Structures are given as structure tokens and as C-alpha cells.
């Protein structure tokens, strides 16, 4: 428990011995460290008194209320079914659409927030919320373009929520390593080696295979038409009819 929590705690014996707390200072315009000069009463959920800002040295009155918790209705959707329940959140916790719901295990992503006043919000403190819609956070599903010479195939890969993808890094698909050559994120395509983004912000990965299978392997087999000329058919070039050709 912090010193400020002790000031706001129920029961005065502990609060009476506290000498500091983070309080809002009108001169500084933000919360700053304060020295508690005087407490008006024995304490409880609401605490008031006199405090001095350690930044600007201004002495002023303060009144603070313990944050406590706030119960919100949670609707968790998983495919065609939804489960309605009540969840207790820290009253001052910030809930934001597109982010994870605070203090929830297993994690879930927020999709909609209904405030107590009936309005819909993209971000709100827990004490302002009536209902929140969430879905289980299974990770980030990212589209991938796999480039093999002239052939490009599409795939999808699911990454853990905290994964960071970077140009020059690697991903493994079906047991084979692929090198990330570009990332599509934030409405742009990024190609520099230092470009990196959380997986949930990446729209598409462009990747190339980092290993070349031996000539004649199934991965490189492809149908061929009739050679355009007898010269091509009798060519003794190092390029194999079943291989990927010389690297350029």
C-alpha cells in the first residue's frame, strides 16, 4: 500500500501518521508529490486537509476520495455464444476499445463500452461504465504473403498478443524458416531492418524462404510446356529443368 492509499484508507489511526501523498496541484496543473500538513478528521473514504506541493511549494486545501472498485456488466462473446457476468474493476482503471480489459485473466479485448449515462465511448474510466463487450484474446491473426521467386502464396499466422514483428526477423511456417522482408502496418509498407511493430498492428507480412531445397524436390516441381525451340531443349546450361535456377 502506498502512502496515498494509507491516507485514503478507512480508519484514522494509520492515516494520521502519513505525511505525503500524490495530489492534484492547480498551480502545476497535474498530480504532484505533496506533504500533508494537516488532516481535518479521522479519515474514512473521504479525506480532506491541508497539503504543500513539493514542486511549486504552494500550500492548498485538498479533498480526496478512495478509489475503491466498481462493478460493470461484462458480455464476453466467443463465436455464436455470449456470456453475461459482473466484473469488479478498479474504479479509476482506464478501459479502451481495442485494448485488453484491465485485471482480467484470461485476457480479453474490449470491443464496445456503454457508459452509465447511456452513451457509447471509445475510452472511459471503470466508474463511468455500465456494460463492456469483450472477446477472448487469442492473439494477433496476421496475413502473410510468401514469396518464392515468381510465385506468391497467401497464408495466415496467429501470434501471441505481446509479439513484436520486425523487418529482417524470421517466422516459421510449416516447419520452415521464412525471412520478413517487409511489413504492412499503420497504412504503409515498411522495409528498413529497424522497422518493428506489435503483431496486433501489422496488417500483412511479406516473407521469403531462407533455405533452398535440393533440385528435383517436390517443393520446386512444376509443370513445363514444350520448349520454344530445339536449341532450348538441347541446352547444356547449368540451370536444371527441375531446379530454381541460378541466384541473382
Image: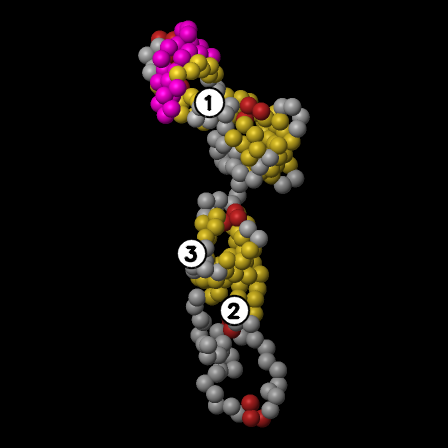
Quarter of the image where one finds residue 213: bottom left
Which of the numbered marks, if any, corresponds to residue 26? 1
Q: Position of residue 7 (x, y in %)?
A: 39, 15
Q: Earlier in the sequence, mark 3 or mark 2?
A: 2
Name the residue rendered at 56%, 40% in the picture. 98
Q: Nearer the viewer, mark 2 or mark 1?
A: 1
Quarter of the image where one finds residue 114: top right
Give the SS element for disc 3: loop
Q: Is residue 22 left or right of residue 174?
A: left
Residues at marks 1 and 3, CA–CA distance in whole angstroms: 42 Å
Name the residue rendered at 43%, 59% in the picture. 193
Figure colour scheme: secondary structure
In the rendered view, would you say 81 is above or below 90?
A: below
Q: Is residue 40 magenta?
A: yes
Res. 105 in view = yes
In the rendered view, would you say 151 is above or below 65?
A: below
Relative depth, front residue between 236 and 197: 197
Q: Earlier in the sequence, mark 2 or mark 1?
A: 1
Residues at marks 2 and 1, CA–CA distance in whole angstroms: 62 Å
Residues at marks 3 and 2, CA–CA distance in whole angstroms: 24 Å
Give the SS element for disc 2: strand
> Badges 3 and 2: C-beta atoms under 8 Å apart?
no
Q: Position of residue 16 (x, y in %)?
A: 35, 10
Question: Range of the magenta residues?
Answer: 34-58
Name the residue rendered at 48%, 50% in the picture. 197
Q: Which residue is mark 2?
A: 148
Q: Nearer the viewer, mark 3 or mark 2?
A: 3
Res. 34 in view = no
Q: Position of residue 110 (x, y in %)?
A: 57, 36
Q: Which residue is mark 3?
A: 194
Task: Look at the image and tell me in which quarter the N terminus lies.
Answer: top left
Amino acid at each position: 500500500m502506498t502512502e496515498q492509499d494509507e491516507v485514503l484508507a478507512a480508519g484514522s489511526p494509520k492515516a494520521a501518521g502519513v505525511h505525503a501523498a500524490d495530489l492534484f496541484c492547480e498551480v502545476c496543473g497535474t498530480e504532484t508529490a505533496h506533504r500533508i500538513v494537516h488532516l481535518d478528521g479521522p479519515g474514512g473514504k473521504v479525506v480532506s486537509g491541508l497539503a504543500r506541493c513539493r514542486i511549486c511549494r504552494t500550500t492548498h486545501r485538498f479533498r480526496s476520495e478512495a478509489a475503491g472498485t466498481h462493478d460493470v456488466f461484462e458480455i464476453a462473446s466467443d463465436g455464436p455464444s455470449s456470456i453475461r457476468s459482473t466484473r469488479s474493476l478498479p474504479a479509476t482503471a482506464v478501459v479502451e476499445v481495442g485494448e485488453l480489459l484491465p485485471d482480467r485473466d484470461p485476457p480479453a479485448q474490449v470491443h464496445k463500452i456503454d457508459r452509465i449515462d447511456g452513451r457509447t465511448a471509445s475510452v472511459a474510466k471503470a466508474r463511468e461504465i455500465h456494460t463492456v463487450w469483450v472477446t477472448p484474446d487469442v492473439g494477433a491473426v496476421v496475413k502473410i504473403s510468401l514469396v518464392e521467386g515468381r510465385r506468391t502464396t497467401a497464408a495466415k499466422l496467429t501470434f501471441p498478443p505481446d509479439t513484436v514483428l520486425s523487418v529482417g526477423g524470421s517466422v516459421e511456417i510449416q516447419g520452415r524458416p521464412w525471412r520478413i522482408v517487409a511489413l504492412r502496418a499503420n497504412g504503409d509498407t515498411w522495409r528498413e531492418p529497424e522497422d518493428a511493430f506489435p503483431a496486433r498492428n501489422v496488417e500483412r507480412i511479406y516473407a521469403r524462404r531462407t533455405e533452398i531445397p535440393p533440385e528435383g524436390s517436390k517443393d520446386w516441381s512444376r509443370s513445363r510446356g514444350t520448349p520454344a525451340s530445339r536449341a532450348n531443349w538441347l541446352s547444356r546450361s547449368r540451370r536444371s529443368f527441375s531446379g530454381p535456377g541460378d541466384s541473382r
